[in-house]
Amino acid sequence: MHGYAARREAMVATQIQARGISDRHVLDAMRRVPREEFVRASSRESAYEDHPLPIADGQTISQPYIVALTAEAALLDRSSCVLDVGTGSGYAAAVLAEIVDSVVSIERHPGLARSAAAVLARLGYDNVEVVIGDGSLGWPAAAPYDAIVVAAAAPRVPQPWLDQLSVGGRIILPVGVPRYGQRLQRITRTGIGPPRIDDLGGVTFVPLLGRYGVDGSPVSPGGPPSPSA
Ligand code: SAM
């Protein structure tokens, strides 16, 4: 079996470019981030396979293609300030941090957030701030954001995200509930009038929990009120 660098190159060619992702910055980022560092030791050999993998707390690290698709859809440039909702392993945050100067990544599971922050720090991603909390409320302290990239599906776009978005900013969000179909949407805040919505296709994500998520409940300070699906 080839080393991780060769597998990463093959992943970009066969899973990302072959499916139409062409943004040079996204492709370069996917070539640089060592995905094997963000998975369990028992999953390292599978790190570059074309599917999500289990991480702690019953959660998953997203399929590489989905990470690339959401990053491209966010229309980022170096100066963009990005909120990443659902840190999980920290892998998507690292990909975003390769493209932009500033990423805030929010996760409701304290253990996941701490371990992602440790991996990101070890790999030198000093432009990512990992915070613990209910990401459905956004993170007002660092607003406004040029993009909010979301790795969990919400029934509808949470109002706090629209409030924390700069004019012209984009939210990349899976909308819908499991078993009834989810659509990836790009929601752009316009200067006047309602946001513009672009449909980016069908997807499958874990649910967004929290105040504006599927359960509508606040996250307790000591951790989540119930396990995620
Ligand atoms: N982007 C992650 C990665 O690269 O590993 C994958 C994220 S995983 C598919 C979705 C994450 O969203 C889970 O870690 C879950 O705990 C988190 N999540 C769900 N609802 C949340 C909320 N209200 N606030 C913050 N994180 C939430």
Image: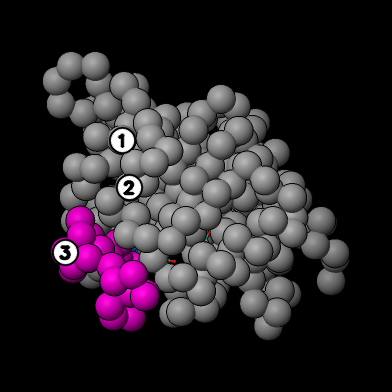
Tag 2 and tag 1, C-beta contact below 8 Å: yes
Q: Residue 61 at x, y = what percent?
A: 53, 66
Amino acid residing under circle 2: Gly
Report whether the residue tagged 3 is closer than 8 Å to ligand 1.
Answer: no
Question: Pointer 1: what residue?
Answer: 164
Q: Residue 44 at x, y = what percent?
A: 71, 74
Q: Is 125 drawn above or below residue 20 in the view shown? A: below
Colour logic? one colour
Q: Label 2's element? A: loop
Residue 161 occupies which quadrant of the picture? top left
Amino acid residing under circle 1: Gln
Q: Label 1's element? A: loop
Q: Quadrant of ligand 1?
A: bottom left
Q: Which residues are magenta?
A: 200-229
Magenta stretch: residue 131 in it?
Answer: no
Amino acid residing under circle 3: Gly
Could you say which disc has been placed on residue 138 in the image?
A: 2
Mark 3 to mark 1 CA distance (whole Å): 19 Å
Could you say which disc has been placed on residue 216 in the image?
A: 3
